[in-house]
Amino acid sequence: NAGVMQNPRHLVRRRGQEARLRCSPMKGHSHVYWYRQLPEEGLKFMVYLQKENIIDESGMPKERFSAEFPKEGPSILRIQQVVRGDSAAYFCASSRDNSYEQYFGPGTRLTVT
Amino acid sequence: DQQVKQNSPSLSVQEGRISILNCDYTNSMFDYFLWYKKYPAEGPTFLISISSIKDKNEDGRFTVFLNKSAKHLSLHIVPSQPGDSAVYFCADSRRSSARQLTFGSGTQLTVLP
C-alpha cells in the first residue's frame, strides 16, 4: 500500500502530556500538509512542509505546536502540554511537486482526558 | 470569515436518483476547487477537481459545475448509489497560499436503497 500512512490511529493523552503524531507521505511525494478537524467542523489547515523546511505555518497555534519533516523519516506533528481543546482528528496529506491534488492519510484521533 | 461554505449539512437521496451537493465561495482568487469524500474514521478521499478557467468537469458518475458569476459550484452524482453515503467536502486551492486547502464544513449525503 503506497498511500499516506499515519500513526498512531488513536492516541489518548492526559492534560499536560505531549502528543507526537507521525505521517509518512506517499512514495514520490515530498510535500506534506497537516490539517485538524474539530468535531462537527471541516478540516482546517495547520502547516505545510517540504523536506527539512517549513514552508507555511500560518494555521499553527502560536504555542505548544510544532512540526518537522526531516531528511529521513516521517513528518512529526508535536503538541506539548496538551489541553482538552486539542482533542480532534489530525490529518496529514501529501502531494507531488506542490500539485493542487493532495492525498490524505487515515488520520490520528487525539483524545485528551 | 468562512471563505468556502456548504450551507446544507445533510442531504438524503433515493438510490438511482441524482445527488446535487452545493458549495459557495467568497474569494475569487482560487486556482482549483476540489471535492473530497469522507467516510467515518477515515481520511478524505479525492474525488474530482475543476480549474478556475473551466465551468464543467466530468469523471464517470461525478460532474462538477462552476458558476463564477454566482461564486457557486456543485457536484452532481448520477446515478446515486448506497456506497456514496458519506460526508462530502469542497475545498479551494490557491497557488498564492502555498496550495493549502480551505475546506467547507461538509454535507452528509445519505443514499437510501
Image (cartoon, coloured by chain):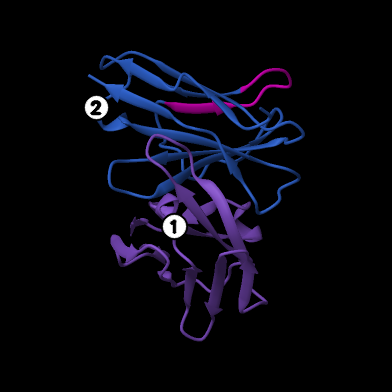
Dominant SS in magenta: loop
* A4 and B3: which is toward the camera: A4
**Callout in the foreground (2, 1):** 1
Q: Amino acid at mark 2?
A: Arg
Extreme residue toward the bottom, this view: B69
Callout 2–callout 1 Cβ contact below 8 Å = no
Q: Secondary structure at mark 2?
A: helix
Q: Residue at x 47, y 72 (%)?
A: B74
Q: Given the image, on which type of amino acid does mark 1 rest?
A: Gln
Q: Drawn colour of chain B?
A: purple
Question: Neighbour class for label 2 at 10 Å: few (<14), some, many (≥20)?
Answer: some
Is residue A61 something that shows in the picture? yes
Q: Which mark is residue B30?
A: none
Splitting the image into 4 quarters, where does residue A71 fall? top right
| Magenta residue span | A65-74
The residue pinned by badge 1 equals B81
Q: Position of residue B94 (x, y in %)?
A: 61, 60
**Left or right placement of residue A4 versus residue B44 in this view:** right
Which mark identifies residue A84?
2
